[in-house]
Amino acid sequence: MFVIKKIVLGSLFVLLSALSFDSASRTSLPDFTSLVTDASPAVVNITAIRKAPDSLENNQEEVPEMLRRFFRDYQQRGTPRPATGSGFLISSDGYVLTNHHVVQGASEIIVALSDRREREAELIGADPVSDLALLKIDAVDLPVVSIGSSESLKVGEWVMAIGSPFGFELSVTAGIVSAKGRSLPDDLGNYVPFIQTDVAINPGNSGGPLFNLDGKVVGINSQIFTRSGGFMGLSFAIPIDVAMEVVAQLKDKGSVSRGWLGVQIQRVDRDLAESFGLDRAAGALVTRVFADSPAAAAGVREGDIIVEFGGRGIDLSSDLPHVVGRFKAGSETHLMVERAGESVKLAVKVGELDADDTSLASTDARAGATRNRLGLEVRAMSAEEKVALDAAQGVLVIKVGEGPGALANLNVGDVITTINSQWVDSVAEFNTVMATLPVGVALPVRIIRSKQPQFIAIKIDS
C-alpha cells in the first residue's frame, strides 16, 4: 500500500509539474491579438486586372489538350485576367506599398480596404530589381502602418504576417526570423538582402506586411521557396529599410537609381582562402572588372578580394551588391581589398546601375598541346576562339588527366587566364609559370567557363 501511495503521489507531482510548465510555456508565447486589431485596418487587398492576349494561336501546341478549349473560350470572351495580392497603407492620404510582381502588366488596379471600400489605384512607380511598387488611391484619413527597422531585427525574433493567401483576406500567420541578408538565385540580381522566416506565406500574401511584436512593419513578404506551389517552411521578405529608400525615389521621380561598381564576383571558400593566404573565408573575390567601370577607374583588379566597402565589412560575397546598391550614383567612398597578402585601400566614385543590367557587374597562332604538373593538356587560342569563348587571353584546356587539375574539377573547354596571380597568354608563359609553382599549398587559378570567369584553388602535391 505504501508503494502504491508513493507512486500515486509521485505521479501527481509529475502531473502538477507538467501543468505548471505548460502554463509557463503558454504565458511566455507572444499574444498577437492586440497587434492584429491595431495593424489589420491598414492592410489592403489588391486586384490587378490584366487584359487577355489578343491571340493564342501561336501557343496552341504548347497548351495541353484538356486546357486548349478553356484558353480558346477565354480568348473569345476577351475576359480580363485578375490576379490578387496584398499591400499596406503607408500614408493617410492613400499611398500603398506592394510587390512589383503583383501589379506588373495590369491595365487596372483595384485596392480593397479593410472596411470593404474599393478604390482604383494609380501606379506611381515600380522597381523590378527590388520587386516593389508604389500605388496611390484617392482617399483621406486612412489608417496607416507603423514603420519599423529591419536593421535592428534579430534572428529568432517573432514576426507576424497579414495578407490574402489564395484570396482569403486579412489572414494572419506567425513565426520567427530564420536568417537575414539572404541572397536568392533569381532575376533580382542579389540587390535585396532578404529576411528569411518560417511564417506561412502563400500565393496572395505577396506585398503584405511583416510585423514585429511592437506592431511595426519590418518587411514586405515577397517570395517563398516551394516545390509544390505552396508553403514549405521558407519565406522571404524585403527589408523595410530597403523598401523605404525605394519609396522615397519612386515618390520623387517614379524610378530608382542604384550604385554600381562594375565587377563580377564569386564566393571565397576555404580552399580559395588558403590559396590567397587569408586566415578565413571572407570577402568577395573579383573574377572580372568591367571596362570603363568605377572599379576599373579605382584600380580594382581580377583576383582582388573586397573585404570592405564604404566602411562596411563584406563578410559574404552576397553582401557586396546590397551595400553598393544603396550608395547614390556619383558618391565617393573607399573600398578595401586583399591583394597578394596585403590590404589595399582604394578610392572609388560609385556609378549608376543600368536598369537593364543587374550585374555588379594581338592574335596567337595555335601552339602545340602541352602536358604539365596539373595533369592537363593546354594550347593557345585563335582570335576566333577568344571571341567565341569571351576570353581576351589565356590557354585552352583540351584534356584533363589524373592530377591536381582533375581534383580541382577543371574541365575540357575551360580557359586558364591566371595561375597564382600570374597572367598566362601562351603555352610558353603557361610552362614558365608551371615551373615556379610551390608544392603543398593551395594556389588560386582564374578560369573562364561558359563565358563566366571564376577562381578555383589547386594544390600541387609533388
Image (tube, helix red, strand yellow):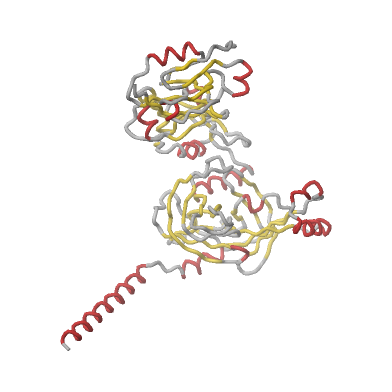
Give coordinates of residue 139: x percent, y percent. Answer: 65, 61
Relative side of 442 to 46, left or right: left
| Quarter occupied by the C terminus | top left
Give coordinates of residue 2: x percent, y percent. Answer: 15, 87
- Give me the residue at 31% from left, 77% from top: 19
- Of the pair 177 and 134, the residue shown nearer to us: 177
Quarter of the image for residue 95 reads bottom right
Vertically, is 56 above or below 417?
Answer: below
Vertically, is 144 above or below 275?
Answer: below
Quarter of the image for residue 156 reads bottom left
- Of the pair 402 and 407, the residue shown nearer to us: 402
Relative side of 374 to 280, left or right: right
> Which residue lies most toward the bottom here?
1
Give coordinates of residue 174: x percent, y percent. Answer: 47, 63
Give coordinates of residue 97: x percent, y percent. Answer: 59, 54
Relative side of 307 to 121, left or right: left
- Give me the residue at 66% from left, 60% from top: 111
- Of the pair 59 and 238, the residue shown nearer to us: 59
